[in-house]
Image (spheres, grey):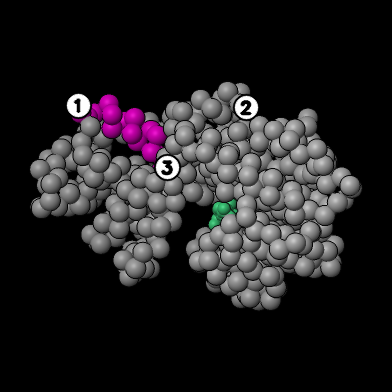
Amino acid sequence: MTENSEEIPGLPARRAALDLLTAALARRAGMEEATSTPGFAALSPRDRGFAHALVLASLRHLGPIDRALEGKLKKAPPERVLNILRLGMAQAFVLGAPAYAAVSASVDLVGDSGATRNFKGLVNAVLRGFTREPPDFSEPETFAPPWLFARWQAAYGRDAALAMAREIANEPATDLTPRDPSAVPEPELEAEVLAGGTWRTALRGDVSAWPGFSEGLWWVQDASAAVAVRLLDLKPGQTCLDLCAAPGGKTLQMAASGARVVAVDRSAARLKRVAANLERMTLSAEIIASDAAQWRDGREFDAVLLDAPCSATGTYRRNPDVLWAARPGDIAALAEVQAHMLDSASRRVRPGGVLVYCVCSLEPEEGEAQILTFLKRTPDMERVPILPGEGGAPEISRLASGDLRILPHHRAGGTDGFFVARFRRTAE
Ligand SMILES: C[S@@+](CC[C@H](N)C(=O)[O-])C[C@H]1O[C@@H](n2cnc3c(N)ncnc32)[C@H](O)[C@@H]1O
């Protein structure tokens, strides 16, 4: 939970929050798209910050907020009104705004024109009702969408599913990867050094103002995301292919190890971020805009990483929208895409070279099941089991197969969920 805010910013910030929440719930990556619009960029930094924080607070508590609202609403109101109610609840009961201020801000947001103008009375009455009987945030299970909770319970057991759901409301700390793995964090970063060498800081706000940013001493990367590249054990001069590279956290790790890196992503816009990140760190890589399943130029690599597009459910601590925008059908569709990409990635590995596959998904179809079928149809690839603690992965994440299934509660303070597997191409 964040600090108490006595004051609620003006209507433009709250309208922006409403647009963000609507986009976040409508489609995958909707929140990212909505924060990249010129309209959002035109807001003051304070209004942008408020809108973003309010929407994240709403999404991190959406399960219990919706349950509480369902109990009070006789029938579902139009979506715009429902989203105004959700934001009002988050203002009052998560961000700690005075209830009267949250109620009047929400009524203002309904407005005097448009199809929903007649819902002012309902918004006022429903939100006021909660000031006497606040929503219940005590049951972890209610924080996850029921279909995802049921999947996690089936895959990992009830205790693990509850522990995963408990992480949903928590604002994550920021993890940094140092360019030089032997460097010691600046004291002003107040960072703890995690297994594997990630620095974890509780600092908040603009990372570009933190010590070491402009000097290119570190970049932001979740501790789990940093594991996969360490498992490639790259040596200076080796060749390495980074498939699905943008925004480039793993490309930076590869380049910092002294490897000669080719970074492929189909999004030219996102590749600009890879180039900017490399420039800040004074590192280099060959950048190629292409579909990873199609790209080939005859080269074979010592090491290949496939960080495949996935449901991204493991990133819910930072991107709680993934929980609510995901649809059951997405998982099977993404698993099919990943299978094509794995086949293509495996053909880019030289005999004796290494392939690491990873996804920031919590869903077995994109991880364990994906690898089973890949190994069956790819006789020249053998699994190279990941050793206990290798790459800084929590030991509890290591499966009997030697793959990693990192769950968000596997590290104190939380971590992104990832599946990681490593293979070697047998010599022909
Ligand atoms: C999980 S992110 C990769 C994160 C990145 N490896 C990092 O560490 O910063 C997935 C990326 O896959 C890219 N992508 C999705 N489908 C693709 C495809 N068919 N070919 C190449 N890239 C693709 C997206 O543009 C996105 O940048």
Query: Taking the image as four quarters, which one is ligand 1 found in?
Result: bottom right
Q: Is residue 327 left or right of residue 81?
A: right
Quadrant of residue 137 in the image? top left
Q: CA distance from mark 1 to mark 3?
A: 25 Å
Identify the residue under disc 1. Answer: 74
What residue range appears in magenta?
58-75
Tell me how far mark 3 sits from mark 2, CA to CA.
22 Å
Q: Is residue 69 above or below residue 360?
A: above
Q: Are marks 2 and 1 in contact (CB under 8 Å)?
A: no
Q: Residue at x 23, y 32 (%)?
A: 76
- Determine which quarter of the picture holds residue 17: bottom left
- Horizontal side of 276 relative to 32 (left or right) equals right
Relative image position of residue 362 (x, y in whole percent): 59, 37
The reply to whether the C-beta atoms of the residues labelled 3 and 2 are less than 8 Å apart is: no
Q: Nearer the viewer, residue 391 or 242?
A: 242
Residue at (79, 59) in percent of width and height: 301
Name the amino acid type tagged 1.
Lys
Q: Position of residue 86 (x, y in %)?
A: 30, 42
Q: Kindly report which numbered mark, 3 or 2, lies closer to the viewer in this rendering.
A: 3
Residue 3: give x, y in percent of width and height. Answer: 42, 52
